[in-house]
């Protein structure tokens, strides 16, 4: 059974990762395949901004260093919410690793949780958090389903992005780069990473993406 099939089988067991009024409230989808314009009225008429899974994006163009392996396809779902919004674990977990990936355009503070479901191990990644989120973490610590374990970071600590959560599901992960895992990939790598990182909306159940 693939990770995608396993998650679909148990999708009713996963809890929200944001406050329910935000995760399931009024939402808009941000088209990151086009250049983004500053929005000075964020969250005035909606509670959530959504950045799509498997979207080819132009917003990564400024951070490309390898023209032969041009990475611009998004492997998670972005959840735009105000800074310091609470983040909860959707399923019982242990802390796999964490790091402050503090280069411009990177994740900023990042936490990876390990989960076990039907004796299968999988991981969830949370990027663009607040630095405060990392202070009391310990590798191997147990986090119960629905437990608050992090908050969303501000732009000056999250890699330079408008406040949001990058949420990603991962099948297998190595220990050679703790607190980090590719959040974007190239076209050449896409088939591999779509298998490794299935659509996070299986866990999130966002109404705005129910037909995707």
Image (cartoon, rainbow, N blue to C red):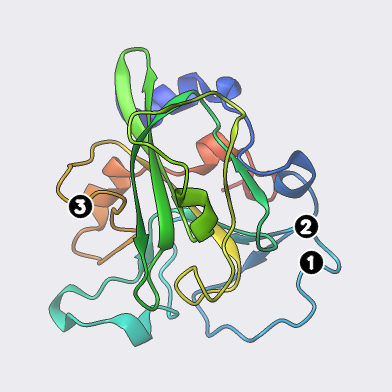
What SS does tag 2 mark? Answer: loop
Rendering coords of residue 48 (x, y %): 71, 58
Please give the residue where the numbered disc 1 appears in the rendered image: 43
Please give the residue where the numbered disc 2 appears in the rendered image: 47
Label 3: how many Cα within 10 Å (few below 14, some 14–19, many 20+): few
Q: Residue 29 or 88: which is nearer the viewer?
A: 88
Q: Residue 93 carries which label?
A: none
Q: In which quarter of the image is the N terminus?
A: top left
Which one is earlier in the sequence, the residue at label 1 or at label 3?
A: 1
Q: Residue 126 or 68: which is nearer the viewer?
A: 126
Q: Which mark is residue 177?
A: 3
Direction top: furthest residue? 118
What SS does tag 3 mark? Answer: loop
Rendering coords of residue 205 (x, y %): 62, 38
> Pointer 2 and pointer 1: residues touching (CB < 8 Å)?
yes
What SS does tag 1 mark? Answer: loop
Tell me if I can see residue 54 in this picture: no
Q: Residue at x 38, y 55 (%)?
A: 75
Q: Nearer the viewer, mark 2 or mark 3?
A: 3
Left or right, 134 with respect to 163, comes to: left
């Amino acid at each position: 059974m693939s990770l995608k099939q396993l998650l679909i089988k148990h999708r009713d067991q996963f809890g929200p990762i944001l406050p329910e009024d935000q995760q399931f409230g009024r939402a808009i989808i941000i088209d990151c395949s086009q250049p983004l314009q500053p929005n000075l009225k964020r969250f005035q008429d909606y509670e959530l901004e959504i950045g799509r899974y498997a979207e080819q994006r132009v917003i990564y163009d400024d951070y490309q260093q390898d023209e032969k392996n041009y990475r611009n396809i998004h492997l998670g779902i972005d959840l735009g919410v105000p800074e310091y919004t609470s983040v909860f674990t959707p399923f019982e977990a242990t802390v796999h690793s964490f790091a402050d990936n503090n280069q411009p355009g990177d994740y900023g503070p990042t936490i990876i949780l390990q989960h076990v479901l039907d004796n299968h191990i999988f991981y969830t990644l949370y990027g663009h958090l607040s630095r405060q989120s990392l202070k009391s973490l310990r590798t191997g610590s147990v986090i119960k389903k629905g437990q608050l374990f992090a908050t969303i970071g501000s732009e000056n600590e999250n890699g330079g992005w408008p406040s949001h959560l990058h949420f990603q599901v991962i099948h297998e992960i190595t220990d050679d780069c703790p607190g980090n895992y590719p959040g974007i990939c190239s076209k050449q790598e896409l088939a591999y990473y779509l298998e490794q990182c299935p659509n996070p909306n299986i866990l999130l159940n966002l109404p705005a993406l129910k037909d995707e």
